[in-house]
């Protein structure tokens, strides 16, 4: 382990482009290989454009990551938000599968964390309180009686430093942010780096890294809202979902885990075989009533610390398939239960009830207050590292 954040390439752009010129028929341009047999090398790029500014005048940029197949991922340095992902259906037609907005002003005005980086603590902490090393900490309460997604101004609402990055197999963006000691009530100065890579295999890979100068708690994630059919214009209840989990963490009426790990077998939470999201969402079940649908953490079946397949979602009309892989122990399934049509997103689309699903990879909610859950403590001298991959294919 090391106590520093890896330095990133200071070159503002690293873009590889390739082209093959046409040869005019003449003796001077004759070649031992016919021009028709020459194949263009693959290319990918990172470009950026203005995306507005914050109320305090901070410049916000929108970065377009293009892979070798021409598929685009757009990410802004405001909140580290994934604004759009264009991926093909079974016919090869590209479509945006993310909910979001056309301008940063809308993200600032009103958003349920569309596509954003979440920190310091993804999900909920009961009553906004926890104790670490004998010291009591109190956080902002912003979700009923509880703290949610980092507080009143979490990582989703700050402007990150951004450096484009290009490798052999991907176009990328490195985002950095220093969270000061006491920010939103959390202890320790935290240095965070998040690297997005949009690969030639239609994967968005997210690598998280952080260090602290005091004991703290940390649970980073991305809050992408997906709709594999039409980017949020219709319901996701017919999407077929598989989650590799034998158990989940039941919640109380304020959506805080009770501390129990309950088997999914015989419940509406059994997604070990692909099942339509809407097949049981209306069942007479206390947990579904508490969450107003699915808003629960699943305990992933895993051995070791590497990437494992956590979930797979397929959409029958377009044939698009999303696989979520992660090094994390849990994944939160959220089914857009609080969307109600009042948020108007990209292209004028009103996001109706259950027009998106989220698969937030994570440690468990309220872990700082549940000693039997995997620990979210980060100590000086340690380096927090975790990876999540969202992989897109078509069937």
Image (spheres, grey):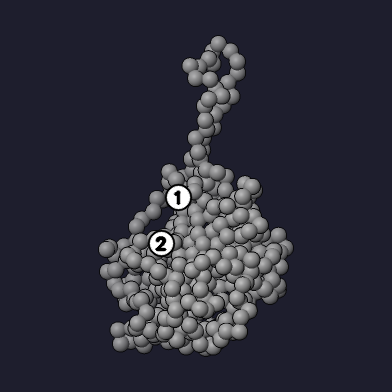
Q: How many angstroms separate mark 2 from mark 1 (CA)?
A: 25 Å
Residue lying at 60% horizontally and 18% vertically, measured from the top left: 24
Left/right of residue 137 with respect to residue 319 in the rendered view: left
Few, some or many residues within 10 Å of mark 1 (<14, 14–19, 20+): many
Compared with residue 159, is residue 198 higher up or lower down, i.e. above or below? above
Look at the image and tell me whether residue 284 can be seen.
Answer: yes
Q: Which disc, if any, is residue 165?
A: 1
Q: Which residue is mark 2?
A: 308
Compared with residue 166, is residue 291 higher up or lower down, i.e. above or below? below
**Disc nearest the viewer among 2 and 1:** 2
Secondary element under disc 1, as helix, strand or loop, is strand
On the image, the x and y values in percent for residue 192 come to 40, 65
Number of dots carrying numbers: 2
Compared with residue 17, is residue 304 higher up or lower down, i.e. above or below? below
On the image, the x and y values in percent for residue 171 come to 48, 49
On the image, the x and y values in percent for residue 284 come to 61, 84
């Amino acid at each position: 382990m090391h106590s520093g954040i890896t330095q990133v390439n200071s070159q503002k752009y690293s873009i590889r482009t390739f082209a093959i010129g046409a040869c005019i028929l003449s003796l001077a341009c004759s070649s031992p290989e016919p021009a028709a047999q020459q194949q263009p090398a693959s290319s990918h790029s990172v470009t950026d454009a203005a995306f507005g500014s914050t109320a305090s005048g901070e410049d916000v940029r929108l970065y377009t990551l293009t892979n070798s197949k021409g598929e685009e991922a757009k990410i802004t340095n405001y909140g580290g938000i994934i604004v759009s992902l264009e991926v093909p259906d079974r016919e090869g037609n590209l479509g945006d599968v993310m909910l979001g907005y056309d301008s940063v002003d809308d993200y600032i005005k009103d958003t349920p964390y569309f596509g954003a980086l979440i920190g310091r603590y993804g999900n909920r902490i009961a009553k906004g309180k926890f104790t670490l090393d004998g010291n009591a900490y109190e956080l902002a309460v912003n979700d009923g009686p509880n703290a949610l997604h980092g507080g009143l101004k979490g990582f989703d609402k700050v402007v990150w430093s951004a450096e484009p990055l290009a490798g052999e197999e991907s176009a990328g963006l490195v985002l950095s942010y220093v969270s000061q000691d006491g920010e939103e009530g959390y202890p320790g100065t935290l240095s965070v780096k998040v690297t997005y890579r949009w690969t030639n295999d239609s994967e968005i890979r997210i690598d998280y890294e952080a260090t602290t100068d005091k004991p703290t708690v940390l649970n980073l994630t991305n809050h992408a809202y997906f709709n594999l059919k039409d980017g949020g214009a219709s319901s996701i209840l017919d999407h077929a979902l598989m989650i590799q989990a034998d158990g989940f963490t039941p919640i109380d009426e304020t959506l805080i885990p009770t501390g129990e790990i309950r088997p999914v077998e015989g419940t509406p939470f059994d997604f070990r075989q692909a099942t339509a999201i809407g097949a049981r969402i209306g069942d007479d079940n206390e947990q579904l009533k508490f969450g107003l649908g699915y808003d629960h953490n699943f305990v992933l079946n895993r051995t070791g610390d590497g990437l494992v397949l956590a979930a797979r979602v397929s959409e029958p009309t377009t044939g698009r398939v999303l696989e979520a892989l992660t090094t994390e122990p849990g994944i939160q399934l959220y089914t857009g239960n609080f969307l109600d049509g009042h948020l108007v997103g990209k292209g004028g689309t009103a996001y109706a009830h259950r027009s998106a699903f989220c698969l937030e990879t994570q440690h468990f909610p309220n872990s700082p207050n549940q000693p039997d859950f995997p620990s979210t403590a980060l100590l000086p001298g340690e380096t927090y590292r975790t990876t999540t991959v969202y992989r897109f294919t078509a069937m």
